[in-house]
Every structure is written in structure tokens, then in C-alpha cells.
Image (spheres, rainbow, N blue to C red):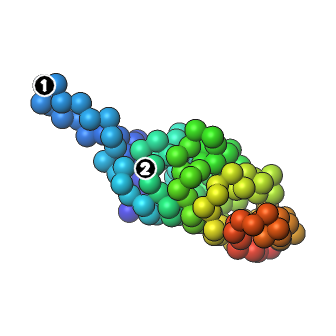
Amino acid sequence: IEDVKDSHLRELLLPATDSKPGHTDSRGRLQNVSELRLSGLDITDSSLRLVIRHTPQLAKLDLSHCNHVGDQSVNLLTAANSPLRETLAELNLTGCNRLTDQCLPLFRRCPRLSRIDLRSCHHITTEACARVAEDSVSNGSAVLPATASP
């Protein structure tokens, strides 16, 4: 799928509208999805808020090569009110060039997160990834980011 915009993703994620009187269902269409690949799409933080709200069971999320994903996006994913904070186990952020070393400590908020792919994130240093991996091992968690490449 190419050229998916916020409006398309919103339509996919929001609850279906049912014309039956008295029938209201606030659950999203993808509420039980455990893996979602949005690689290369034009995803903004607005779309990411919808993903967080309407796919609360996500264990694997692929946002690789999404040009608008940055440190604030990671903050949204790992925020106290994000259900993904408790469910996310794998996160692919390959090629998200708006990410910086500043987002790395935020991953500690996700106790189940065991794999973060940060390859080709040009503003994330190998040294910062090594520190996060080292801290994770010493704290007994398993956050092991893939090494950022130069």
C-alpha cells in the first residue's frame, strides 16, 4: 500500500459506524491486532495517537522509514497513558531520521520491550545504544537496541 495518509489510517482504525438505532461500539476495528507494519508510510504523531488508542494489544510495531517519527513519537508510545507501554515487545524504527539519542531512555518505560531496531537512524549514536543495552542488562530488563549504523 502506498501513499497512506493520516485520514486513511484514521478511517481504518476508528470504530465502524453502525446505522442500527441504539447500537454504539467504541472499540476500534483493529483492537485485537498484535502486529502492525506501517513501514514507509506518512505517519504523524496524530496518526500514532490513533494507533495507540485503537490497537491496545500491539506487541510488534514497525514504523521503519516513517519520516515524521521522532523523539516525541517515542514519548507518545511510552507515555503513562499508552496501553502499548505494557504490551510492546518489538519496535522497528529503522531509518527514522528524526530520532535522536534523547529518545533512548524513554524505552525503559516499556517492561516487555525486548527488541528495538534503530539501524540507519543517523542521529542516534552507537555509544548511546550501547549505554541503553548496558543499563538494561544491569537493571535486569532486556531492552537491547540494534546498533545504530553510521
* Label 1 element class: loop
Q: Amino acid at mark 1?
A: Pro
- The circle drawn on residue 55 is 2
Please give left or right for residue 128 compared with residue 85 in the image: right
Q: Residues within 10 Å of mark 1 (few under 14, many from 20)?
A: few
Give the CA separation, mark 2 to mark 1.
Answer: 26 Å
Picture coordinates of residue 125, whole percent (x, y): 83, 66
Q: Is residue 85 visible?
A: yes
Picture coordinates of residue 45, whole percent (x, y): 57, 43
Q: Amino acid at mark 2?
A: Thr
Q: Is residue 125 visible?
A: no
User: In the figure, residue 108 lies in which quadrant?
Assistant: bottom right
Identify the residue at image location x=47%, y=57%.
58
**Residue at the limit of the structure toward the left, as seen here:** 20
Please give left or right for residue 33 compared with residue 117 in the image: left
Q: Earlier in the sequence, mark 2 or mark 1?
A: 1
User: In the figure, residue 21 lies in which quadrant?
Assistant: top left
Q: Nearer the viewer, residue 73 or 21?
A: 21
The residue labelled by disc 1 is 21
